[in-house]
Amino acid sequence: MQDYTVHGWEDHHFAKLPKGSRGIDQYIGDPEMIGVGHGSAFIGARMQALFDEKAPVIATDPHPGNERAIAVYKKLGFEPVGPPQETRWGLILPMIARR
């Protein structure tokens, strides 16, 4: 898992979010760890830490076809904030969670 400032790139698709907003990305590589709650647990824990550190918004950008990831993000309070869009990092569905 990583988190990063969304203001690190002028052309980043989340650059218009409030100062202090963080983006998150993660990868679960071991197929045996998928579908048993690990994603929800470690993403939720990192979100809590970021909100405790006063991040006003947390953003993420799964591929629109990644239904499992989108379902987990929604379960954790993320909401889509626009249609899928093409970025220099690929096709994404912009999603945010607010403190």
Image (cartoon, helix red, strand yellow):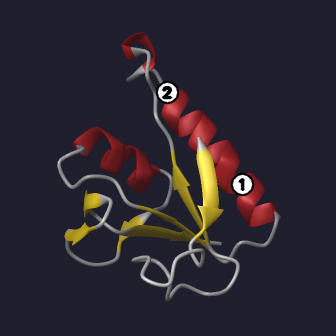
User: Where's residue 75, x and y in %?
Assistant: 43, 50
On screen, 21 above or below 60?
Answer: below
The residue identified by callout 2 is: 37
**Left or right: 31 as drawn, with respect to 37:** left
On screen, 17 above or below 86?
Answer: below
On screen, 21 above or below 47?
Answer: below
User: Callout 2, which amino acid?
Assistant: Gly
On screen, 29 above or below 93?
Answer: above
Give the crowd class for mark 1: few <14, some 14-19, many >=20 residues within 10 Å.
some
Residue at x 59%, y 74% (from the top left corner): 8
The residue identified by callout 1 is: 48
Q: At numbered mark 1, what does the secondary structure look like: helix, strand or loop?
A: helix
**Left or right: 11 as drawn, with respect to 71:** right
Q: CA distance from mark 1 to mark 2?
A: 17 Å
Give the crowd class for mark 2: few <14, some 14-19, many >=20 residues within 10 Å.
few
Residue at x 42%, y 82% (from the top left corner): 11
User: Where's residue 25, x and y in %?
Assistant: 50, 49
User: Where's residue 10, x and y in %?
Assistant: 50, 84
- Please state which of residues 36 and 5 is positioned toward the viewer in this rendering: 5
Q: Which residue, as the protein is rendered here, is positioned at the far top?
A: 32
- Please state which of residues 85 and 69 is positioned toward the viewer in this rendering: 85
Q: Quadrant of the N terminus?
A: top right
**Left or right: 35 as drawn, with respect to 64:** right
Which of the 4 image quadrants contains residue 56?
Answer: bottom right
Residue at x 52%, y 38% (from the top left corner): 40
The circle drawn on residue 83 is none
User: Where's residue 16, x and y in %?
Assistant: 49, 89
Which of the 4 image quadrants contains residue 51?
Answer: bottom right
Residue at x 46%, y 28% (from the top left corner): 28
